[in-house]
């Protein structure tokens, strides 16, 4: 029994040793497999690293080219106008348009006489800087209105004298038409046959007339004036006086006269009413001036006088109006209907009467002459 027990114990020990041997072998196999797997991983990792390096090298090549290109400054082409600019234009002005219009004419370059210890010119020299400012101020004068301009007392007195004279002439015309001489003249004119010329004595030499209210025998030069003639007489004088008063009141050689762009502004400022070309049967201010071209004209875009007389010589405007009336009548007698005027009643508004605008078209309120 002891022998059997011993053999049994030895057999169990042997089995345990064999079991341990097998376990050890399995562990060794696992370790070998792990080492193989790790080696394969290392190899694969190395391969991946090599591939990544190659890709990086490929990417690095164009990046270097791009970086070289980026270092080069972009080429900019300036226009001729941009090349003339010394300062970048501002989108927002330092001053309001109203304040700029009021004060820009007094802008100047600083001077030592004003108390400055030293004045440095960084961009341009003294003379060039002053010339630059002068040109900018001159440009502003051409494009801006004088918002604080007030008509002088001379203008108000001269206009008042003309308006009183105009009333006096119109009253004299009414008085003449009511007189025996006026009635006889009207009857003779009515009996005149078509195509028959008037007697020479009726067509007096206008330039030789000394008194437009009495050319002889109490007959006024304006005896045949119609509404359109009085309207053109007033227009002649107003435009002539406007350009004369502007030069006198502004007294600035850089502002030679009323420009067409600002014509409406200054006409309203002086006469306190608007001037509508359509009230005279025309569309533009240029066409309006052509109606009285013997007295006023546009030189470029500036309103100028076509006369050498003074605004106080009101009789000249009566003579110019009568000359125009006779020429227009001769054309109408010859069948030229284009000479016929179409003037609205509101064309003879008084100064300060407000602005209601002219009639449109040739409907109610229009007079044809």
Image (cartoon, grey):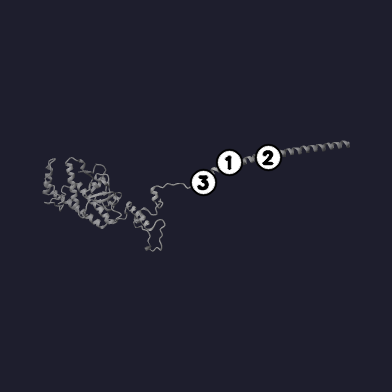
For marks 1 and 2, give the CA distance. 24 Å
For the residues carrying marks 2 and 3, which lies nearer the camera in this image?
Answer: 3
Mark 2, Cα crowd under 10 Å, few <14 / some 14-19 / many 20+, is few
Residue 284 coordinates in the image, percent (x, y): 27, 45
For the residues carrying marks 1 and 2, which lies nearer the camera in this image?
Answer: 1
In the rendered image, is residue 354 in sight?
Answer: no
Judging depth in this view, the residue of 64 and 246 nearest the camera is: 64
Residue 309 coordinates in the image, percent (x, y): 21, 54
Q: Secondary structure at mark 3?
A: helix
In the rendered image, is residue 247 in sight?
Answer: yes
In the image, which disc is placed on residue 55?
A: 1
Circle 3 residue: 68
Q: Secondary structure at mark 2?
A: helix
Left or right: 184 as drawn, with respect to 111: left
For marks 1 and 3, give the CA distance. 21 Å
Residue at image location 86% in from the left, 36% down from the top: 7
Circle 2 residue: 39
- Disc 1 or 2, which lies upstream in sequence? 2
Judging depth in this view, the residue of 182 and 111 nearest the camera is: 111
Residue at image location 18% in from the left, 45% down from the top: 327
- Asked if disc 1 and disc 3 are in contact, CB closer than 8 Å, the reply is no
Residue 201 coordinates in the image, percent (x, y): 11, 47
- Disc 1 or 3, which lies upstream in sequence? 1
């Amino acid at each position: 029994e002891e022998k059997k027990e011993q053999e049994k114990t030895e057999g169990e020990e042997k089995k345990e040793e064999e079991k341990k041997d097998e376990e050890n072998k399995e562990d060794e196999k696992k370790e070998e497999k792990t080492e193989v797997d790790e080696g394969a991983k290392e190899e694969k990792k190395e391969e991946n690293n090599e591939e990544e390096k190659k890709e990086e090298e490929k990417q690095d090549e164009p990046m270097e080219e791009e970086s070289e290109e980026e270092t080069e400054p972009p080429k900019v082409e300036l226009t001729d106008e941009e090349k003339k600019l010394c300062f970048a234009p501002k989108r927002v002005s330092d001053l309001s348009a109203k304040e700029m219009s009021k004060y820009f004419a007094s802008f100047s370059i600083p001077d030592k006489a004003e108390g400055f210890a030293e004045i440095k010119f960084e961009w341009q020299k003294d003379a060039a800087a002053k010339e630059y400012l002068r040109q900018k101020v001159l440009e502003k004068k051409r494009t801006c209105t004088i918002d604080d301009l007030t008509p002088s007392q001379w203008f108000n007195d001269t206009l008042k004298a003309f308006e009183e004279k105009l009333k006096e002439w119109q009253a004299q015309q009414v008085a003449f038409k009511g007189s025996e001489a006026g009635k006889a003249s009207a009857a003779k004119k009515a009996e005149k046959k078509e195509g028959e010329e008037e007697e020479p004595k009726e067509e007096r030499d206008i330039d030789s007339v000394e008194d437009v209210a009495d050319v002889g025998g109490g007959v006024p030069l304006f005896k045949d004036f119609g509404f359109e003639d009085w309207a053109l007489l007033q227009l002649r004088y107003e435009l002539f006086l406007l350009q004369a008063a502007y030069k006198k009141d502004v007294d600035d050689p850089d502002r030679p006269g009323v420009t067409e762009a600002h014509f409406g502004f200054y006409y309203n400022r002086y006469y306190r009413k608007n001037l509508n070309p359509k009230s005279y049967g025309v569309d533009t201010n240029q066409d309006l001036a052509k109606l009285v071209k013997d007295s006023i004209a546009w030189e470029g875009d500036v309103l100028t006088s076509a006369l050498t007389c003074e605004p106080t010589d009101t009789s000249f405007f009566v003579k110019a109006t009568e000359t125009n009336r006779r020429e227009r009548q001769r054309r109408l007698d010859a069948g030229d209907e284009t000479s016929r005027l179409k003037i609205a009643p509101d064309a003879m508004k008084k100064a300060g009467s407000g602005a209601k605008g002219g009639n449109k078209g040739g409907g109610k309120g229009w007079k044809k002459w």
